[in-house]
Image (cartoon, rainbow, N blue to C red):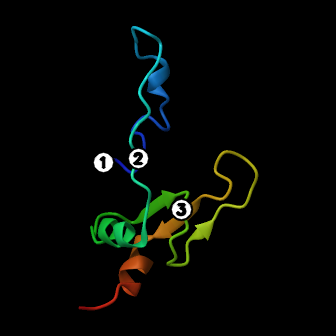
Amino acid sequence: MPLMDEDWKLLSRNRDPHRDGRRAAPRLTPLTAKSLLGLCSDPVLDFLIAREDVGFDPIRHRHAGPWMNWNLYDCGHVRGLRPSG
């Protein structure tokens, strides 16, 4: 399942023709510490942004606006904190 609605930024859902004018809400997977570790294990992924604060010292966006209280995770940092074994 996706972590986030694929149309979150483009808002393409507003352009999709719908018979009844409604779209089913996407089934999103909330971020957990375990899923963050799994996602950040991909060496190509540098950063991840999420509403959830699951630890790992995220940088929190504190300015007013649509991103207020979202968290920026540095996957290099997360990988460095991953327990060995």
Element at label 3: loop
Relative side of 58 to 65, left or right: left
From the image, which quarter does the C terminus lie in? bottom left
Element at label 1: loop
Q: Position of residue 27 (x, y in %)?
A: 38, 42
Residue at which label 2 appears: 28
Residue at which label 3 appears: 52
Sequence-first tag of 1 and 2: 1
What distance separates the C-alpha of mark 1 from that of mark 2?
7 Å
**Mark 2: which amino acid?**
Leu
- Identify the residue at image location x=66%, y=61%: 61
Q: Any mark on residue 20, and which?
A: none
Sequence-first tag of 3 and 2: 2
**Mark 3: which amino acid?**
Glu
55 is higher (above) or lower (below) than 31: below
**Mark 1: which amino acid?**
Met
Sequence-first tag of 3 and 1: 1
75 is higher (above) or lower (below) than 26: below
- Identify the residue at image location x=54%, y=64%: 72
Q: Position of residue 49 (x, y in %)?
A: 50, 58
15 is higher (above) or lower (below) than 55: above
Residue at which label 1 appears: 1
